[in-house]
Amino acid sequence: MTAPTTPARLAKTRTADTAADAHRHRRQRPHRRLRRRGPLWYLGYLLLLVWTLITVVPFLSMLLLSLHPTADIYAHPLGLSGRWMLSNYSTAWRGAVGGAPLPTYIGNSLLITLCSLAIGVTCGSLAGYGLARATRALSGAVSRIMVLALSIPLIVALIPTFEILGRYRLLNSVLGISLVYAAFMTPTIALIMRSVFAAVPRELLEAAKIDGCGEFAALLRVVLPISKGGFISVSMLGLIFVWSEVQFGVVLLTRPQNRSLSVGLLSFQGQFVSDQGAFFAGLTIATFPIVILFLIFQRYVTNGITLGALK
C-alpha cells in the first residue's frame, strides 16, 4: 500500500524539488553566460582596455617625467629610466626666470574660473530654461544656431576678440578674459540645461503657478532645486575648458602677473633654454586637482552630456 500523502510530506517534497531546481540553474547559469558572450563581447572589452591605456598612459608618463632632469627627459621620453629628483616641483613652484611664481598663476586661474562660471552658467541656464519653455519651432531654430556657433573654431574669433577687448581696455584683465570664456561656454551650457529643464514634469510648474509663483519664481523655487545634477555637470565642463584653455590666454594675457596657470607654464619653455622637468612638474600640479574633481563628479558630467546628446 502507498503511504498517504500528508501536508508535511508534501511540503518537504516541494522544498526538495525547489532546491534541486535552484542547484540545476546555478550549474547551468555560467554555461548560459559563456554562450551569450560572443566574439563581439570580447572585442568590445579589448577596445575599452586599449582606450583606457591610451587615456591613462599620458598621465603616468607626465608624472614620471616630472621626476627627471631635462637631459634625461630628452634621452628617455617616456620617463621609464634616468635620474630621479624631486627638486623639479620646488623649481616649478618658484616659477621660471622672467615669470611669476606658480601660486600667482594658480590664483589668477581660480579667479578667472570663478568669474567665467558665474557668468556662463547663469546666462546659459537662463537661455536653456527659455529654450525648454519656448515653442518647439523656436526652440529648434535657436538650438540649431547654437550648434552652428559651436562648430566655429576658436582661433577664427581670436583677432576680433583681441580688437574688441583692446578697444574697451579689457586686455590683461580678469573681467575681459572671463567674458570671453563665458561667451564661448554659454551655447554648450544652454543646450545641456535645455535638456535638463525639459525633463522637469510640467505638473510641478503648473502647481507652482496655482500657488501664485510666476515664471522666474517657479524657476528659482521648483526647477533649480531638482536640477542640481545638471548644474554640477555644466560647471565641471566649464571648469575643464577654462582651466586648460591656452589660445586666448596667450593673446589676451601678456603680462606675467596676469597670466593664467596654463599660460604661465609656457614660460618654462623658452626659445633657447627650457626646463622640461619643471614644466612637467607644473603640469602635474595643475592637472591632478581637476582629475580628482572630475572623478568625484563624473556621474553628473556623464548624465549631463547624455541629456545634451539625446534632446
Image: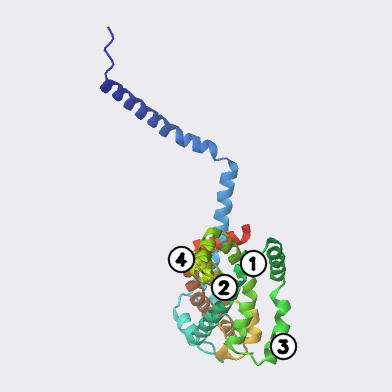
The image position of residue 294, as x and y in percent, is 50, 67
Calculate the distance from the C-alpha at mark 3 to the C-alpha at mark 2: 24 Å
In the image, taking residue 198 as reference, residue 86 lies left or right, namely left
Residue 309, quarter of the rendered image: bottom right
Dot in front, 4 or 2: 2
142 vs 7: above or below: below
Dot in front, 1 or 3: 1
Calculate the distance from the C-alpha at mark 1 to the C-alpha at mark 4: 30 Å
Q: Which residue is mark 2?
A: 238
Say what secondary structure mark 4 lies in. Answer: helix
Dot in front, 1 or 4: 1
Q: Which residue is mark 3?
A: 163
Say what secondary structure mark 3 lies in. Answer: helix
Marker disc for residue 131: 1
Q: Which residue is drawn at the image coordinates 61% and 62% (left, top)?
A: 308
Calculate the distance from the C-alpha at mark 1 to the C-alpha at mark 3: 32 Å
Q: Residues within 10 Å of mark 4 (few under 14, many from 20)?
A: few
In the image, taking residue 67 as reference, residue 308 lies left or right, namely right
Q: Which residue is mark 4?
A: 296
Label tally = 4
Q: Earlier in the sequence, mark 4 or mark 2?
A: 2
Question: At label 1, which amino acid type do we have?
Answer: Leu
